[in-house]
Amino acid sequence: MARKKRMSKGYKAGLITFFVLLGIILILSGTLSITQPFALFGQEVYIPQYLSAGCSPRADNMALVNIEKHTDVPSWYHCTTEGSGKYIPIVNGIQCDYIVKDTGIIWFNAICEGVVENKDVLTTDKCRRGTSTLVDLENTIIVNSGDTLYLNTNRLIGDATLRVKYPSYGLKVETADGRDLATTTNCELTSLSREYHTIDAKNAKLVVPDVPFNVVTGLSKAYSSQVVTLLGIESGNPIYISKPGYYFLIDTADDGFKYVDTAAGEKQSNLIQCIPRTTGCNDEAKIVKLQEQPCDKYGGAISDYSPVEGDSTRLCKYKCSFGTLALTGDCIQVVKECPSKTPLWDARTGNCVSLTPPQLVSKEFNWVGLVLILIGVIILGVSIWYRYSRKGRR
């Protein structure tokens, strides 16, 4: 019985060790397939593509509509969204055109402030009354948005027809070259698709005509090593280093995400000599001397354009010469200003590029390596079990 207990303990110990090691390997393998860039600023920051938006007339704005239900019975007509079925902003300059064509004589109308349907107001200062004695002619009555038209044509000998031109507005999103991307049926910010993020609309729920605002779409994550806080720049607030000597401010959109404010333009600072956490640059954006650093065929060589000590206006390539790094003449100049359509500078090519930087590519998971590791764990587990089993038999 004692021998069985010792064998049981050895067996259990071997199994516990095996499964613990197996669990550790599986946890580690789950993290291998995800690229986790180091972030000097501990929040995600995005580079946006700016678009222009505004409350604009739709294609059916002021289209002529027949009011089939109009009769000679006195009626109220409202120059509002509810009265028209189209979105009508209640602002100065927006109006409805009611066109009356009669075949008789003497008819009566009144334009009243606000939405009313009470004949008692017709005799008050809230209404401006008018009559017509024109025969068989079209008469246009202009009513401001938000107001009401009272129309009485029952005094006619014949019949009258009513047509109207209603305003029709919606939120329109356009690219920089004027190409329409989206148009909604109203000017409520909630009608925008979730892919659009407002920038300066603040807490407004409605947008009035002729007051454009910015939206962004096509978001991409900014390189984490370029989003930093540096002593002496912007009071320690986070910035985005666009290239040596230059940076963008970081702002917050109306829905809370942080973005690189390329629309505000680049700022300059001599404190930024290079991009942190890249070859030849430390966390304080200062150039680290590369020349005469040791190198050989096994390591230490540099393939990309890298900073040059004492000169932040250019990046150069280095070669490994006689065991140390040596500066070459293969250099690119740091562009002082990029155009608005391509506001970011690519340190790999020296060219100005669009708002979408290359995405970090996740490493392809190495299943062969995982299988070999698991086989090793199994062999280790079996050997531990075998050793404890032998001890148990003695």
Image (spheres, rainbow, N blue to C red):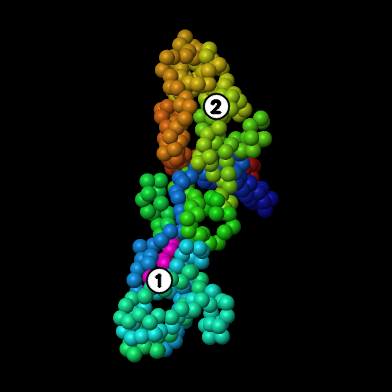
Residue 239's image quarter?
Answer: top right
Q: Where residue 97 is drawn, which disc sits there?
A: 1
Residue 120's image quarter?
Answer: bottom right
What is the x, y in percent for residue 150?
Answer: 47, 81
**Residue underneath mark 2:** 245
Please, is residue 58 above or below residue 257 in the view? below
What is the x, y in percent for residue 374?
Answer: 50, 43
Please, is residue 260 above or below residue 286 in the view? below
Give the Cα separation between the discs numbered 2 and 1.
Answer: 59 Å
Say which residue appears at 50% left-offset and 73% top-offset: 147
Mark nearer the N terminus (2 vs 1): 1
Please, is residue 294 above or below residue 92 in the view? above
Image: magenta residue range: 161-170
- What amino acid type should be assigned to the residue bearing mark 1? Asp
Magenta span includes 329 = no
As drawn, is 160 to the left or to the right of 96?
A: left
Magenta span includes 168 = yes
Viewport quadrant of the C terminus: top right
- What amino acid type should be assigned to the residue bearing mark 2? Gly
**Farthest-out residue, right:** 2
Whether residue 337 is visible to the viewer of this picture, yes or no, is yes
